[in-house]
Structures are given as structure tokens and as C-alpha cells.
Image: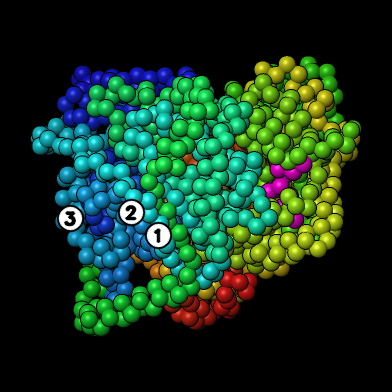
Amino acid sequence: MASNFKVVQEVDVNGHKITKFRSNKTGLSVVHVDNEGPIVNGYFTLATESFDDDGCPHTLEHFVFLGSELYPYKGVLDGLANRALANGTNAWTDVDHTAYTIATAGSEGFLNIMPIYIDHILYPTMTEAAYYTEIHNVNGDGENAGVVYCEMQGRENSASSIMDLRRQRTMYPENSGYRYETGGLMSCLRSLKAEKIRQYHRDYYRPDNLCLIISGRVDHQKLLDALDPVEERIISKGPLPPMKRPWVDSPQAPLMSKTTKATVTFPSEDEDMGEVAINWFGPPITDFLTFQALDIIETYLTDSAVAILRKEMVEIEDPYCTSIDFRTSQRIRVEIQLSFDSVPTEKLEEVEPKFFSIIEKIAQEGFDMERIAAVIKREKLKLLDRLETDHMTLAWPCLIHFLYGKEDDSDLADFTNDLDNLDAVAKFDNATWIKYLREYYIDSKRATIIGKPSAAHAAKLAEDEAKRIEEQREQLGPEKLKELEEELQKHRAQNDIPVPAEIFDNFPIPSAKGIEMIEVLTGRSQPSSNFNNEIQKHLDNDASKIPYFIEFDHIKSEFVELTLFFTSTELPPRLRPYLDIYFESFYSLPLVDPATGKETHFEDVVRMLDNDTVSRGCGAGVSNAFRQLALVVLKTERAKYSEGIAWLNKMTWNTRFDADRLKVIATKLLNDIPGQKRDGARMSRACMDVIAYDHDNSNTAALNVLEQAKFLPDVIKQLEQEPEAVIKAMIELREILTHPANIHIQVQGNILNQNEPKTAWAKNFGLKNAATTLAPIPFSSQVWSEAGKAPGMKGYVVNMPSIESSFASHVARGPTEFLDPDYPALLVLSECLDTLEGPFWKQLRGSGAVYGANLRVDIESGFLSFTIYRSPDALRAYNLAKKIVDDYASGKSKFTKQELEGAKASIVYRIVRKEETISSAATESFVNQVLKKVSANYNKEFLERVQSVTPGQMQHAMDKYLSKVFQPETSLVVVTSATTKVKDISEGFKSIGFQLETKNIDDI
Ligand SMILES: [Zn+2]
């Protein structure tokens, strides 16, 4: 059959082709963004506008996943998604749209699942039972529950939500959808009815308000063929009444009529640090040039230590805040938000006047045009870099275009071609920049919101909530409560009707072999017979001798990324805590020329680095593993390969640890801590790290915020009284880290394009003496504490007045070798349990016991962990999870053939995902060959090992590892909890054999 879809627009952005199709029968839009790589990403987007705080857009988002007309089963979509080589599905709700997402390995599975996904979006069942469990219910204890309700309970009273709602209320009138909390306020959710959400679905979830944005390698013909049955089905439903376009056809909000300032409080035990946000309206969304100009001004003001706002407000002895960020949201009229994070409470009122005195001065004296030019050039390079490394770079403007672009799509190019706008603003003169600064920031009306931490607010929230529940219980009475509990169980049973096995069996799993991976070719600095390829030949042809270790990973990139990996094993315990200051200061210290002794001011160093690099960073570990390694990364355009190396050389050896700089940096790190201490999930991990890792030798323990909270005040004091001691420590730390035996280097980029890839190092890098042997790569599993070595009985229940729910971390020992024969089986077992719509999901999330629950097998740390994310009662969640695991361990529950197949398919996605872009593929090549000491083919071979896992091997992994996480004698536990629940939780754990200490966060 001839497709209904016609190409309505084609755009080329620096070689990436965007094609937009629309159906002339149903109005359904499809955008394909052609991107290299093995992963196909889908963002299925609807414009959603809502005029109250009931949260229809968000609750509907949850409804969609609970079954469709053709597939009326909860869990079927995620089960099938796994078989499409995805890791389930996901979605987000923003104030102006809802997007349903999926990412698959290869396109075959994507095209198979897409029509089924669309059936869920357009024709969900939206049953009463689904409403009850997924959105809101009152349980037998008289508590409000439901997945959405608990999610919002965890969010509504955070500093950012409180400030954001105040902002929305200030900027928009009652007839504007931008004014409301689309997630749903708790008080509204408690009385929201399912029928209202169903009506919302009828109003907004229509094919002509749906755009399928697809990024990755997909054949157009196959894509349109896969949509044929979708079209047929939509047409069979008959015509729809005409629809007004959300947002575009709604009354437009006026600009703010006056400048306002408001103070709100947020719950926080620690009253030291608050937040400030200044909000303005920007230009209409289609004024792209202005949008770009403002983006440059904002980057100019904040992007690095020499940017004026950071220079005068952050990088000073007594800072106003720890970070300053602009965020522009592309609404029909752009919203600009400037936030100042971690502002000392006594400075909350000073932030706004200080900010305006700075920009007023710029308006009078003009911009530094040289720096403006540098900012624009760098923004352009960053954009080109993002085009290589991030699918969203083009998918996002296509999404915004769908919401706000012209109906005939003629302006798609305008939404996607930031490169042209960057060229245009590069021609602006100083007067033009000043005009923009005045018009949008100085003269424009604004809404300033000050967020003040309040322990009293926290106490009142807890008190009010306890009282409300108490009253609710009383009002309902024991009879009604019993009835409610029965009703809940009935609905739950209804949701849990199993998906017929043949639905899964009829959905084919694509072969992983057909997925086109990105090829990375590896060579080494020394001639090597292991790498018989053109890269090694090219390297060998470069006559320079490099006596140290460099791995070159070749990819087709416009950029080169250089990374130094320092082994930190030899650091003595007294120096290790200084690592954070070392990382934070690495790229912003004065430089001393070793030949002449001439010093370059740190601001000039930063300015020059900005000119020569696209990005740079410093920290512990690679994506949260290998944290015993200190990493220094620098990315530059490929023409600046040698300059990049020279910079690494200078910053590694020639910086001077300046006491004033160190003090500024230490103060900033310290001021950031109270904000982190309000985060329940983060604190449960942090406390666990304190217990599980060796205090003296582990970077994870030493860099932990709870450790740093004690260490940094001492350093700051010392910098005032006896700075030499700190400087001496920093020098010592650097000497140990940069000892030749401790350095591994990776270069990723277009190696063949560099004429002398080795000579550039020989000329520019000061590591002259090779170490006879390189220090072995340290694993986190080598720095366990005594409790980490033999987990059992130990743990904390931590009282956190700033949160309203609870979080938990349960840890036991796991395998420590990447080639451990039990590893694939343990991974499949974990995936079976915690996959979307698997047992944890259904019984923990489905019963309202948690928002999320995860198992993680981490070979590098040697720990197997179970995490509870946001639960009304972490003890109940733990008991439920333990029962699930025990039943599988005893054989009472068994995984079906379909569950096993789904879990294995989902692992395919997760492994392939690691090599999603050219840059992640190159990183993975190094991680495998150098850090993990396995072959470059490790991931491919691992996929085969996963495919062959048997139920017997899983039983073995269960007995040997997983069941240990749920036994007091073999596990460690940390629960962070709202004050109201602390007593119940700690007594509950005691009654099942744990000896947990109850603590306040500051006492850990
Ligand atoms: Zn949600």
C-alpha cells in the first residue's frame, strides 16, 4: 500500500540529515534524525497543556504504561520492549509536553515495538484498577499512596519545587498553562478522579498532536512500512473533531507588569545555605537570533572562573554562592532563570543587588570583545562536539519545533541551525551587546525569589502530615480502612493478570549480531605485536620514542580527547582527602614557567585554556567506577592536538598552589555540602560508603561529602594560619600522583589524521623517565573497610528532617573479577528481578511501597547492592523485597522462559549502549583493555556468555551472592528517613535481626 506519509521538510545540519514526514490522513508527524551509532532513540511527543494543579499530564503519562486496547495488560509494553533489545521504556512530563521514550540496540527491534508503543499512547485502557495503584489510593493504614502520589510526595517540598512553583505563579496569570504544576500537587492528587484524566486523554492524545522523533540509523521505507498498521487503526476509529493547537492557539500571557521579590522557606535542618533565583521573560520563541545572543551573554557572564559573575561572586574569599547558572526554557516566550546555589543565609538579600551592580557596570563600560569572540568560537566547537556525542542535540530542537513551530514546517531549519545564528552574533559590536543586556536583564521586569532554609518548616511539615493522617484514619474508621485495603488488593490483583505467554513468544528478538557497532582501532606508544592494524603501523612510522604508556584509540572525530590516569594507591591517608581540592583547582591555578620563573596569573591561564579547549575536567574514576584513579581530561579540536598535550603538561607539573586560590576553592567545596546533605538518596549512598570503604586508603571514603564536611573547615583554618603546611601537602600529593609509574595515558580521536601522533608527546610532555614497571590499576574492591570485607549486622538509620520519605542502601559482597564465571548469571538474575514490570517493579512499586528499587552488580567495587529509592516506609519495602528474593531462592517462584529471554535481551541493550557514540566507544575500548585488562572484544564475548546462562547457573548465583544481600549476617544497611518514620524503621530492623544505630546525618 502506498504510504500516507509525505516528506514535508528536509534539513541538513553539518552533515546530519533531518527528515520530517506527515500523514495526510491522520496528521501524525514523524521526524527522523540520521545519527551514526548502534542505538536508535525514540521520543514520542505530545503537546500537553493543563490549567490546574491536578497533574493530568503527569498522571496520564503513568496511565499509558498500564495496558492498551490491543494489549490490555499491565507490563506488556516493557516486557516487549526488552525483547526489542531495549531496557524498558520511559517518559517525562514537562510543563508544555509529554514525551515517551525508548532506546533500542539496532533498528529492527525499534520498528517492531513502535506500533505497540503508539497503541498504548493513543488507546490506553485507563482502568479504575490502574488508577488506584498507579496514581493514588488510601491504604489500609489510612495513608495516602500510589506511585504518582509518592513521587510527588518526594518532590513537592524540595527547595527547587517550592521556588519553581512560586516563579510560575508570579510570571503567569490564571488562564495560562505555564502557571501550573503539571506533576500534580499532593492536595489535588488526593481528590483527582480517573474520569478527569480520561477526558484529558481524549482532548490531547490525538494523532495530529503526536510527533514521533526518532534519532539513529533507520531505513525510511521500513520506518513508514512499520507505521502502516498504525495508520489503518487510527483511521478505523473515525474522524476526530477539529483541535486547537495547545499553547500556540491559547491566550498569550502578558509580560510581567512589575518587578517583584518574594521570600519562600523550604524544609531543611541545616539553616546555613539558601538559594536565590531571578526570573525574566526573554524574546518570543521564534526570535532565534536574540535567543542566541542572550545565550552568549549568559555564557560570557558565567562559564568559567574568569567569567565576571563567577569571578566577583564565587571565586572570592567570602563567596555569595557556590555556583551561578542561567537556564533558558523555550516556551512560547522564552523564560530566563538565573540561579545562585548554596547562598549563605546571611547573604541571601545581598545577591540580587550585587548581581545588578555587576551587570550595570558592564552596560556602562562595555563587554570585553575579545572574550565575547572567544566565547562564541567555543560555543560553536561545543555544539559540533555535541552533534558527535549526544542524540538530544538535534532531537530536542525538533521537539520544540513540533510544539511551537509553524504548522507548514517551513521553519524547521530555523529551529535547528544554531550554527548560522552563532555566525550572525559573531558580527555584533559592543553597542549591540549592551543593548541586549539592557533590554532583557536590566530594564526588563523580573521576579526574584529567595529560598530560605527553615528547620521550623521541616518540623511543621512533619507535624501537619502526621496530624492529617491521624485525622484521616479517625474519619475513615476501622471498618472503612479494612474495606479500602480489600479494595486495594482487588485492584492490585486485577492489574496483575499475567500477560499471555504467546504475546511474548510472537514478538521476535532480533539477533545481536546484526547490530552495527562503531569500530575503534587501537594502537600503543610502543611497537606492539598485539595491534596489527593501520593505527599501530601509523604510530610505528612516527620515529619518536615514547618511553611511557599511551593508548591511541582511533575514531572518526573532529576532536581529540586526552586523558591522564593517575594511580593513587601510594597516597598516604593524611594526603588523600586533599584530592578534592586538587581536582577542583587543577585547571585554575597560576602557572610558573620552569625556565624563566615567570608567573602567569590564574585568570590568564583560564582564559587561554578556554581558547584552546572544548572541554576539560578532573576527578576520581570513570563513570563511577575505578575511583582509585585520578583522571585529568582535556578535549580540543584536532588541529590543536599539540597545544592540548602542552597544556596537560603545564597543568600537571608547572602550576603553583596559591594559598588564596586554595582557600577560595576549599570554601566553595564546603559551601556546597549543605545542599547535598538534603538529598536522601545521596546521603544513603554516602553513609554506606563511610561504612564499606577503608577510611585511610579509599578515595570513595576520603572524598565522601560527610568526610569532606569535617576535613574542609580544618584546611580553611590552616590556610589562614599556616598556609605553607597545606601547600606542602598539595605538592607532596602531586609528586606521588604524577610519578612516572603512576601514569597511564589515553588519546582518542582521529589518529590517522595526525601526522606525528607520538612526536607531539615527545615534544610537549615532560614525562622524560619511564618507569620500569607501571603501578597496577587499583580496584575499589582492594580498599574495603573491615565491614566491607565481611559485611554483616552493621548499619545506620539516619534521621533526615529535610525529606518526607525514606531511601535505603543494602550491600553484600559480589564477584570481583570481570571474567568471573558467575558474573553473567548474576547479572541475568538481577535483571530478571529488577527489570521494568519484573517482580520488584510489580510488587514493590505496584504496591506503592517504593518509587524505585534497583539491584546493581558492580565488579570493580566487588559489591552487590539493593537500593530503595523514595519509599514511604523503607522497612516495609525491604521486607517485601526479601520475600520476593527468598521465594525465588527456595524455588517457590520461578522465572518464566519469557522473563529469562526478556532479561537477556535487555542486557544486550545495556552492553551495546556503552558504545553508543564514537567517544563512548573509544572510552570503552580503553576501559576494557587497560583498566579491566580484558580484550577489546570483551563486550561482544560477554553478550554470548549472557545468552548461554542457564537457570541452574542463576540458582547458583542466587545462593552464592544475591540472597546474601537480604540476610542480616552478610549485609550492610543504611536507611535515610523522614523524622516521623525513624523510630518504626529502626525498631523494625532490630526485630528481624539487624543491629542498626540511629544517627543524625551530622554524627556520621
Ligand atoms: Zn512520574
Q: Which residue is mark 2?
A: 170
- Residue 963 rendering spot, x and y as whole percentages: 53, 64
**How far is the residue under mark 1 from the one under mark 2?**
9 Å
Mark 1 or mark 3, which has the lower sequence index? 3
Whether residue 969 appears in this view of the structure is no
Q: Which residues are magenta?
A: 578-590
Q: Secondary structure at mark 1?
A: strand
Left or right, 944 with respect to 613, comes to left
Kindly tell me whether mark 2's CB lies below 8 Å from ligand 1. Answer: no
Q: Which residue is mark 3?
A: 196
Q: Give the quadrant of the C terminus.
A: bottom right
Give the amino acid type for the residue marked by disc 3 in the picture: Lys
Q: Quadrant of residue 941?
A: top right
Residue neighbourhood size for the residue with mark 3, other residues' Cα within 10 Å, grouped as few (<14), some (14–19), many (≥20)? few
Whether residue 753 appears in this view of the structure is yes
Q: Quadrant of residue 870?
A: bottom left
Q: Give the quadrant of the N terminus.
A: top left
